[in-house]
Amino acid sequence: MKKIDQCSVCKTKLKEEKIIYTQKLGKEVYVVSGVPAAVCPQCGEQYLSTDTVDRLQEVIEQGEKGKRKPIKQAPIFHYPLA
């Protein structure tokens, strides 16, 4: 598979960074830090490799099954409705 080096949105050269990935499944929100990604410094678009996506799915599935414990807990607040 060809490595993406240019943003498909704004055509800017991408930079390798570690990001915080979030995914909501049902009522649960999973947050994974230190995820390698190619990130556009212009518009912020993020690209994950196939291997990274596969690994994220494994980590989240392990969390769902209770095989992986969270390293931190964070409060989640609802946006106030006017």
Image: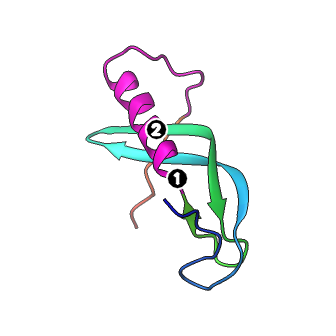
Residue 18 shows up from this direction: yes
- Magenta stretch holds residue 52: yes
Given residues 40 and 30, the one toward you in this image is 40
**Range covered by the magenta-colored residues:** 48-74
Residue 77 shows up from this direction: no
Drawn side of residue 4 relative to residue 81, left or right: right
Say which amino acid is labelled 1. Answer: Ser
Residue 2: horizontal and vertical position, in percent? 53, 64
Drawn side of residue 49 relative to residue 54, left or right: right
List the single residue furthest toward the front: 1
User: What secondary structure is marked by label 2?
Assistant: helix
Q: Indicate whether 18 appears above or below 47.
A: above
Using the numbered discs, state the Cα–Cα distance from disc 1 to disc 2 in whole angstroms.
Answer: 11 Å
Say which amino acid is labelled 2. Answer: Leu
Given residues 1 and 62, the one toward you in this image is 1
Mark 1 against mark 2, which lies toward the viewer? 1
Drawn side of residue 44 relative to residue 55, left or right: right
The residue lying at 53 percent from left, 47 percent from top is 21
Mark 2, Cα crowd under 10 Å, few <14 / some 14-19 / many 20+, is: some
- For label 1, the residue is 49
- For label 2, the residue is 56
Residue 17: horizontal and vertical position, in percent? 72, 53
Residue 81 occupies quadrant: bottom left
The residue lying at 56 percent from left, 33 percent from top is 74
Is the C terminus in the top left, top right, bottom left or bottom right quadrant? bottom left
